[in-house]
Amino acid sequence: MPAIVLVGAQWGDEGKGKATDLLGSAVDYVVRFNGGNNAGHTVVIGNETYALHLLPSGILTPGVVPVIGNGVVIDLAVLFDEIDALEARRFDTSALVVSANAHLITPYNRTLDKVVERFLGTRRIGTTGRGIGPTYADKMSRVGIRVQDLFDEKILRQKVQGALEQKNQLLVKVYNRRAITVDSVADELLAFADRLRPMVADTARLLSRALDDGHTVLLEGAQATMLDVDHGTYPFVTSSSATAGGACTGSGIPPTRIDRVVGVIKAYTTRVGEGPFPTELLDADGQQLRDVGAEYGTTTGRPRRCGWFDAVIGRYAARVNGVTDFVLTKLDVLTGRDKIPVCVAYDVDGVRHHEMPMTQTELHHAVPVYEFLDGWSEDISAARSLTDLPDAAVRYVSAVGELCGAPVAAAGVGPRRDELIAIRDLV
Ligand code: IMP
């Protein structure tokens, strides 16, 4: 039975929460496989807005089992704050399952994220400051603390002590901060152990069984292709694998079981934080996209950098992820323009590139080559099928699919859950 991967095709904030939610009622399990509470999923149901940072957005769909996979890094205080906030709004979160192998964000990881960014100055990444990068660094350095360590206090303390021997040297001697004690870290983590324990499982085995039993599993990526640590605009990336390959390593589901890869792509482009962004608009058009599209970070509230649609990136995302279908979001934000520029290639020092340039230097020099598509002025938020759309909007949707190399299966025309045009089935 199908395992479907859903990933962001640009720099994040494409509206993945809405796409996941759209699929949610057709799937049995929704799994997060990467990132932590740096993600920001906004789901609008009726007049209510739900901002999720760590929990899989499938948690809002009754009957779905939400899973936090081994590839996620967890800040336990945030996890329980989100659970409590949803419970207060009468959502049942009791089905949540958390991988015993997921890594925990510790107080020293959070502190180091902030002080290192400050130390980098103009070379900063513009991280969310949630400790994500340092926690993944600890995982790779094999000094990370995992969920299962909470259930063996002796081992937990040993591991925290081992990690702090290095971290405190850095904090005190390099960054001029106070040392952190083993007790303070262990106590903060252990305070959550009893509440967490019933949720913890071998999620890779659980998901494998679910697929054997004919259930549908949705693997929900956080961040996006261009923020992937391998395939994104390194070093201006997050520290996890946000592309389709990461869905396998971050969940324990093998590649041979993946049936479909859905790329979520916004009708224009945004990014948060530093790093190259060829179609960025620093003018009134950029400000208008930001205002109309409400482009302010769900997690940090930061204004997002905005620019025109970039088909070089869409094409790259289709290739790297093996996208079978795109979900195009926020088409309505483009309403009211005479012509809409779409970047179809880059000019890099006089050479035309239809594909992503190989080097960071080339990407920094990339100047967008635009084609100008006809715009539309009609309000499209009530459209529920392609035939309800003005011709120019239909052409925009088709152009995205043609330029990027995979069909558009749905197009978002407003923030609400139902403000969507379904073009072809995803499940
Ligand atoms: P980190 O993930 O906090 O380490 O931040 C690294 C980069 O990824 C920064 O540019 C962040 O702004 C960006 N980033 C992380 N999570 C998201 C997200 O969910 N949406 C958009 N950008 C993100």
Image (cartoon, helix red, strand yellow):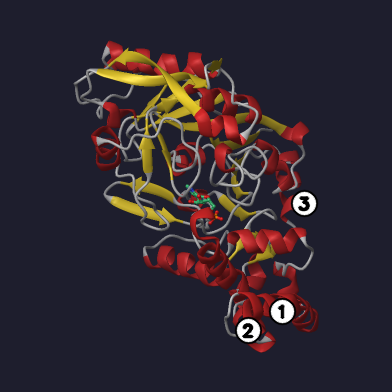
Give the residue type at disc 3: Arg
Q: Position of residue 119 (x, y in %)?
A: 54, 66
Which residue is found at the position 20% from the left and 26% from the top?
A: 379
Q: Nearer the viewer, residue 116 or 328?
A: 116
Closer mark to the observer between disc 3 and disc 2: 2
Figure quadrant of the C terminus? top right
Q: Which mark is residue 63?
A: none
Above or below: residue 67 compared with residue 219: below
Q: Which mark is residue 180?
A: 2
User: How busy is the neighbourhood of tag 3: few (under 14 within 10 Å), some, or many (20 plus)?
Assistant: few
Question: Would you say the residues marked 2 and 1 are in contact, meaning their CB atoms lie under 8 Å apart?
Answer: yes
Q: Nearer the viewer, residue 178 or 17?
A: 178
**Disc 2 to disc 1, C-alpha distance:** 7 Å
Among numbered discs 3 and 2, the one appearing first in the sequence: 2
Does residue 275 appear left or right of residue 156 in this picture?
left
Q: Which mark is residue 164?
A: 1
Q: Which mark is residue 205?
A: 3
State which quadrant residue 133 falls in.
bottom right
